[in-house]
Amino acid sequence: MGINANTLNEVDYFNANIKSHSAYYSEQLHLPLVRSRFISQSKGQKSDYRVNLNLFCYQIRIALEADVKDTLKLKQAEEFYPKAIELVEQSAKLLVKLRRYTPPDNKLKSYFQNADNYLSWHTEQAFLKLLARGPKSSDFSRERGAVIDFCKQESEYREKLSYNSQVTLEDPNRITNKMRLLERLIEYGVVFNKETTNLGANLKRMARGAVTAVIMAFVMYLVLNARSNFEEITIALIALLGVIYGLRETFKDDLTQWAWRQVQKGRPKWRNKFKNSVNDATVCTQMIWLEHIKKKEIPEDVDKLLKKRGRQNRQEANFLHFCAKNQVHVDEFLPGYEEVQQRITFNMSSFARYLKKGAGKLYSLEGHKVSKNSVERRYQINLVMRFKTKDEVQLERYKLTMNRSEIVAIEQMKD
């Protein structure tokens, strides 16, 4: 691909293409009601109402997205539609639980209306997506009609309560952006605020100062020697001094960059602090490494995993190493939660610009007829994920297939 330390700057790639997300997490995705009792204003403090309501709604959203994704993997209508009906029934029960109590306080009521409006719209969109992408079959028209009826009920419910104006409903952009805003509002107290610090700024200044001091000492040594060899100022002396200072300016930046890379090698480059948006307490601290490494620097267990590739794939490659080390502060958790979820997203568009766009033709013989098929140029990236805790180390290898316009496939390799 031509991707290496000279063409892909780690700092630029991190700032533009790597996003970290952290939020409270519970493995009981289908039991968000674990906190439903706190939604009642009569149980708990008023100040806790918004946070508990958001936790409840956020957990429903995560559960629904996970179930819709799993259901879309079912390609047979006989499996797909019963699962879709089951999801409709679960979602209806959860929405009833949410709407069972409407707070009389106007301030709290606005929180409820925002959450109810978003969750109703998001649920409807999830099931419409399910029907649009799912298998089509006339044998399951009754089940398909049940899902459509549920979507209509939610739409009529929002219309009855005048949650959205007619102008907003008629403009797809306006309604979508409004719901994005409401989505951000229900993440308050659940999704942590991120604060990124660039590490090594003072160390970089020290490295630059040390290199400058060494170069200046060497230049002064040459200048003093040159003065001692010339009894008076001549054109030759002036020319020699010009060459000395020219060499200093030529190599100063290169030496500074080389020295900084040596000092920074193996050190974390960034620190993310994830803070609770309610009380600003630090819930998780994340140290980030990102650097180009040589083959000999790859951990032994990762190297063994890479050697299990097919022989045709064992060729020289460039290695980009990303590491995130998390330290979670359990004492700062809200009641009822014991885990956080870390999600890191890598944008591969910076890789795509190095790929060639070329296509070709594949000829094949079918009887006495020659057929021609168009083919595209594809590239493969080996991704090794290494998850380490105090008790265990887990390794997984994936193969990313991509062309210049998209990621074609992500396949887990069973070695």
Image (tube, rainbow, N blue to C red):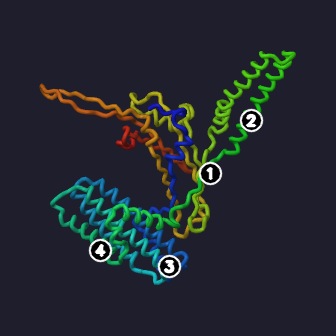
Q: Which of 157 and 385 lies nearest the eye of the viewer?
A: 157
Q: Position of residue 179 (x, y in %)?
A: 40, 65
Quadrant in which residue 201 is drawn: top right
Labels 3 and 1: the sequence-earlier one: 3
- CA gap between label 1 and label 4 equals 47 Å
Labels 3 and 2: the sequence-earlier one: 3
Residue indicated by mark 3:
107
Residue 274 seen by the camera: yes
Mark 1 secondary-structure assignment: strand
Q: Residue at x 44, y 43 (%)?
A: 348
Labels 1 and 2: the sequence-earlier one: 1
User: Is 327 left, or right, of 382 in this rendering?
Assistant: right
Q: Amino acid at mark 2?
A: Ala
Mark 3 secondary-structure assignment: helix
Labels 1 and 4: the sequence-earlier one: 4
Residue indicated by mark 2:
210
Q: Residue at x 36, y 70 (%)?
A: 120
Residue indicated by mark 4:
156
Mark 4 secondary-structure assignment: helix
Few, some or many residues within 10 Å of mark 3 (<14, 14–19, 20+): few
Badges 1 and 4: C-beta atoms under 8 Å apart?
no
Q: Position of residue 76 (x, y in %)?
A: 23, 54
Residue indicated by mark 1:
197
Q: Which of 316 and 160 lies nearest the eye of the viewer?
A: 160
